Amino acid sequence: MHSPRRTFLMTVAAGGAALTAVPVRAQVKLDEKDPQAVALGYVHDASKVDAKKFPKYAAGQLCSNCALYAGKPADAWAGCPLFAGKQVAGKGWCNAWAKKAA
């Protein structure tokens, strides 16, 4: 028969193993019509930025090379702290774009 302490430790160990097997909930992709996205001029495809409305935009600026992009440069989608819980397109752009440090 197991002692209460041993039973407790076995239960905790089994519970921890079960938690690591549960996949992390996938983040949703940011909708261009999301109010925060609209406010920042976010688009999934940087080639579609309205340069008259957002004169800060320059060719070559992409979410994937922005300092705020939480993924790897090759990732098609990744998180961004400006859009909590949502992913932005690596080929996207918004007015908060900032050059990634070299």
Image (cartoon, rainbow, N blue to C red):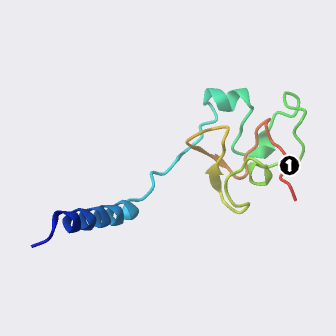
Left/right of residue 75 with respect to residue 66 in the rendered view: left
Residue 83 lies, in percent from the top left, at: 63, 38
Please state the total of marks drawn on the protein image: 1
Q: Residues within 10 Å of mark 1 (few under 14, many from 20)?
A: few
Q: Residue furthest left?
A: 1
Foreground pick, 14 / 96: 14
Residue positioned 22% across, 64% down in the render: 5
Residue topped by disc 1 = 99
Considering depth in this image, is 13 or 69 the residue closer to the camera? 13
Residue drawn at (52%, 47%) of the image:
27
- Screen quadrant of the N terminus: bottom left
Q: Quadrant of the C terminus?
A: bottom right
Residue 14 at what x, y percent from top left? 28, 66
Label 1 residue SS:
loop
Q: In the rendered view, does 47 fall on the left or right side of 79?
A: right
Is the residue 36 above or below the residue 24 in the image?
above
Left/right of residue 95 with respect to residue 78 in the rendered view = right
Position in image of residue 85 (x %, y %): 55, 42
Seen at 48% across and 51% down, the residue is 26
Q: Position of residue 4 (x, y in %)?
A: 17, 63
> Residue 7, located in which quarter of the rendered image?
bottom left
Q: Residue at x 60, y 40 (%)?
A: 30
Furthest residue toward bottom: 1
Amino acid carrying mark 1 in the image: Lys
* 78 on left or right of 17: right
